[in-house]
Image (cartoon, rainbow, N blue to C red):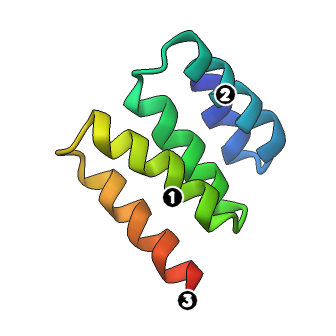
Amino acid sequence: INLGSLEQGQNRMQEALANFDKAIRSNSKSSKAHFYKGSALVDMGRFHDGLESLNTALYLAPNSPHIYNKMGEAYQGQG
C-alpha cells in the first residue's frame, strides 16, 4: 500500500493500481487497500470503478470519514 501511495502521489497511476491490487490479493479484507485503489481510480476519472472499490472499503470500515469524502468526490465527478 505504501509504494502504491507513493506512486499515486507521483501521478504514476497504473503502477499505483497494480500495487493496490497486489495488496488486495494479499489481504482482501484490507479497507485501506480498497480505499487507495478507489481513490486512484477516482483521481483518474474512472468514477464508477472507483466507487466499486470505495463501496468495498466502506463495507469493511463503515466509520471512516475519508471514504465518505472520496465517495462524494466520485459522485460529483459523475455529474
Residue 62 image offset from top left, x and y in percent? 21, 44
Q: Where on the picture, by quarter, is residue 18? A: top right
At horizontal 35% and vertical 52% (from top left) the residue drawn is 67
At horizontal 70% and vertical 68% (from top left) the residue drawn is 45
Which numbered circle lies on residue 21? 2
- Element at badge 1? helix
- Element at badge 3? loop
Q: Quadrant of the N terminus?
A: top right
Which kind of residue does numbered mark 3 sit on?
Answer: Gly
Rounded to the nearest angstrom, the CA distance separating label 1 from label 3 is: 14 Å
Which kind of residue does numbered mark 1 sit on?
Answer: Leu
Disc 3, disc 2: CB below 8 Å?
Answer: no
Residue receiving disc 1? 51
Residue 38 image offset from top left, x and y in percent? 55, 49
Residue receiving disc 3? 79
Sequence-wise, the earlier of marks 1 and 3 is: 1
Q: Quadrant of the C terminus?
A: bottom right
Which kind of residue does numbered mark 2 sit on?
Answer: Asp
- Element at badge 2? helix
Residue 22 image offset from top left, x and y in percent? 67, 19
Residue 57 versus residue 47 in the image, above or below: above
Rounded to the nearest angstrom, the CA distance separating label 3 from label 2 is: 27 Å
Residue 31 versus residue 27 in the image, above or below: below
53 displayed left or right of 32: right
69 displayed left or right of 77: left
- Crowding at dot 1, Cα within 10 Å, few <14 / some 14-19 / many 20+, comes out as many
